[in-house]
Amino acid sequence: MSSPVALGAVVVLTYTGLGCFTLFMATIPAETVPRGALATALGLVMGIGELAGGFLAPVIAGWASDNWGLETAMYISAAGAVLVVLLALGLKETAPAVLRRKNAAAVGAGATERATSAPAVS
């Protein structure tokens, strides 16, 4: 990659996925797994992440860089960041407190709507 601007854009795109680590490593398992299985779920997520990120990704990126050039590793990393963003867009809210707040707002909005749309009785 001969353009510093393009390289900077790839680096920024690559690091946008880093903000999602806390989501998939702690928050999502803590909200979706029963309390008794929480430690196991967190251990599996972190163990698989370490295995894939610490062993498989460097091997794959090194092999790809040997075959297609050093910039290939950056493209692989950027593709991973894009994949994380796309997967994050498909998440559904599961936090009990947030769901209660949304349900209460929906019930309140429904009651207000019924009151304002009811025909006037004279």
Image: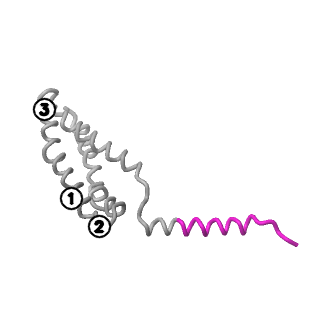
Q: Nearer the viewer, mark 2 or mark 1?
A: 2
SS type, badge 3: helix
SS type, badge 1: helix
- Where residue 98 sits: x, y (%)? 45, 66
Q: Residue at x 11, y 29 (%)?
A: 66
Q: Which residue is mark 2?
A: 36
Residue 117 painted magenta: yes
Residue type pointed to by label 2: Gly
Q: Is residue 28 above or below residue 67?
A: below
Specify the segment rendered in magenta.
103-122
Are circles 2 and 3 on residues that touch, CB within 8 Å? no
- Where residue 40 sits: x, y (%)? 23, 60
Q: Is residue 98 above or below residue 66?
A: below
Residue type pointed to by label 3: Trp
- Where residue 93 sits: x, y (%)? 43, 59
Of all residues, the one furthest to the right in this rendering is 122
The answer for how far apart the CA atoms under marks 2 and 3 are is 41 Å
Q: Which residue is mark 3?
A: 63
Of all residues, the one furthest to the bottom in this rendering is 122
Q: Which mark is residue 43?
A: 1
Mark nearer the N terminus (2 vs 1): 2
Residue type pointed to by label 1: Gly
Callout 2 crowding tier (Cα within 10 Å): few <14, some 14–19, many ≥20: few
Callout 3 crowding tier (Cα within 10 Å): few <14, some 14–19, many ≥20: some
